[in-house]
Amino acid sequence: MAKNLELSIRNQCAILVLNRPEIRNAFDDELIANLAKTLRKLDADDSVRAVVLMGAGPAFCAGADLNWMKRMAGYTLERNYADAKALADMLKTLDRLSKPTIARVHGSAYAGGVGLVAACDIAIGTVEAEFALTESKLGLSPATISPYVIRAMGERMAHRYFLTAEKFSAAEAYRIGLLSELCLPGELDDKINELLGHIVLGGKSALAQIKDLIRAVSRGPIDDTMIDGTAQRIAEIRVSKEGREGIASFLGKRKPAWAAALEAGASAKAPAPKSKKSKNPKKK
């Protein structure tokens, strides 16, 4: 694993750590490429049931690395497009991962860091976390992260925070839907472990199909095509091997095979590592 990214897998849950604490996990083209590559590998790994994304040190992710931004300033339009497309594709990979994803948010999450939070299925943040979409103050636009952030906070709040670039609190992030839940700093890992314990008891195929269902239903009109599509989806999953086992276990008042196997092998909970401390974090 690259030095700017750490991965551990425990009890079928992957813990993916942005590891640039000295610059508050700001990302550059190298980290973006490594993150995209690792996410694709995790998506293809049948043993992984869920993915937790977190940052080492005092912050979740401060957005773009200043040195990377300096390099971008000298790029041609064509090279800027290729550079931006790599970020857009990484966010798409995170968003479309077939496994449930949880953002573990502490400290600051700025600009592209907000995009990472929004692209995850669930985002748990501490009450001390802080957010900002700072692009307009640099004469830029939050274009690549916008599909995920607007989906999370809604169009109205996106107008405010995209245009003002003001900082906002974890409480506000929770109020507008960017965060799924708030907790005290010392409770963050326990809360994520609790969620993982629930997630890994679900059927693998069911979880992937539920994610696809949400994408399909939330982005279209409730017309005859959608209604027929939802009926087709449930019919197909009912006759699948996993669906038949789930129904049989319920009727037989026993645990489904995947949950019984998990219980026999290990605890359903996968403890997330504590945030790493940076000895000399640089303030941005």
Image (cartoon, rainbow, N blue to C red):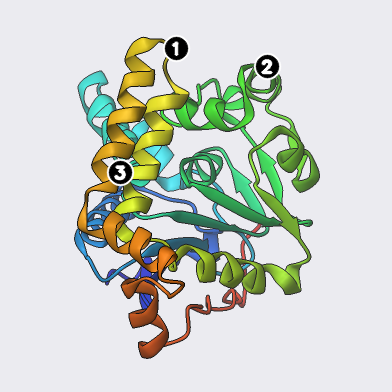
Identify which residue is drawn at 37% across, 18% down: 226
Q: CA distance from mark 1 to mark 3?
A: 25 Å
Identify which residue is drawn at 46% across, 41% down: 119
Q: Is residue 250 visible?
A: yes
Look at label 3 and name its amino acid. Answer: Thr
Callout 2: few (<14), some (14-19), or many (20+) C-alpha neighbours within 10 Å?
Answer: few
Q: State the residue position of label 1.
A: 221
Callout 3: few (<14), some (14-19), or many (20+) C-alpha neighbours within 10 Å?
Answer: some
Q: State the residue position of label 2.
A: 156
Q: Which element is circle 3 on?
A: helix
Residue 116 image offset from top left, x and y in percent: 48, 45
Q: CA distance from mark 3 to mark 2?
A: 26 Å
Identify which residue is drawn at 55% across, 50% down: 122
Residue 59 sits in quarter: bottom right
Of circles 2 and 1, the one toward us is 1
Identify which residue is drawn at 65% across, 52% down: 108
Of circles 1 and 3, the one toward us is 1
Q: Is residue 16 visible?
A: no
Kindly identify which numbered label has been placed on residue 158: none
Look at label 1 and name its amino acid. Answer: Pro
